Amino acid sequence: MSERPRPQGLHPLVSAAANGDIPGWAVAGENRRAHMSRVARLLERWGRELGLGKDHIARWRAAGHLHDALRDADPARLANILPGRLRRLPPRAYHGPAAAALLLRDGVRDRDLLHAIRWHTLGSRKFGTLGKALCAADAIEPGRRGRRGWRKELRARFPLEVDEVVTEIVRYRIDYLLRARQFVHPRTFRFWNSLVNGS
């Protein structure tokens, strides 16, 4: 798996986010911002371990700081940002697509970054390394409570076993939802199938 080549330089908003400065439209409280910072640090660590270049690592840090930028916003407000087809998503998943839509509106054209932010909650069979890394980091960053040993082990394994770690995280998520008799979005099942089929 490799990152697509990126043009030289980063959009100013992405550069700012890489340094922890999130956009003015963000709705994220103190605890949420702390989570975003931990995800960004973990993504930076993994990017370095994978030998990514400076701009790629900055993009990964930015993804960490931006993925939950609207997580604390009212879903009814976020619905107004989304195109009609995305309003059919579960409201708890609105924040990723809404953040990606606002980033695009503000001139960010980094398709891999936008796709990772848009679908980090539900997953995507079209994820590249960045999308999988963001999905994983969001789930197993060190501040998450419960199953701390499991999360620590997965964090250590990630750079060498990207698909295996992401598959384990998605399996756990689906299993949790099934046990709780909750809806599992078809996109999450498609992501699962792409991981286990190697496609």
Image (cartoon, rainbow, N blue to C red):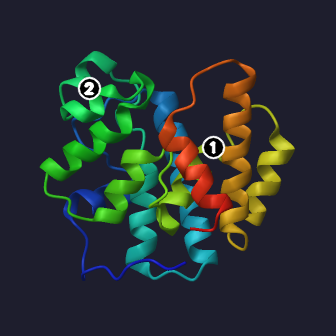
Q: Nearer the viewer, residue 32 or 100?
A: 100
Q: Earlier in the sequence, mark 1 or mark 2?
A: 2
The label number, if any, that marks residue 78 in the structure image: 2
From the viewer's perspective, tell me whether residue 53 is left or right of residue 45.
Answer: left
In contact (CB < 8 Å): disc 1 and disc 2: no
Q: Nearer the viewer, residue 3 or 89?
A: 89
Q: Residue at x 34, y 32 (%)?
A: 70
Image position, residue 80 (x, y; %): 18, 25
Cα separation, mark 1 vs mark 2, equals: 23 Å
Image position, residue 103 (x, y; %): 22, 49
Q: Residue at x 60, y 78 (%)?
A: 50
- Residue 9: tell me if it is visible: yes
Instruction: Using a 10 Å C-alpha cutoff, classify the residue at mark 2 as few (fewer than 14 neighbours), some (14 to 19) or many (20 or more).
Output: some
Amino acid at the residue labelled 1:
Ala
- Residue 38: tell me if it is visible: no
**Placement of 160 over or under 172, stated as above or below:** below
Image position, residue 35 (x, y; %): 54, 39
Which residue matches tag 1? 139
Instruction: Using a 10 Å C-alpha cutoff, classify the residue at mark 1 as few (fewer than 14 neighbours), some (14 to 19) or many (20 or more).
Output: many
Image position, residue 59 (x, y; %): 39, 66
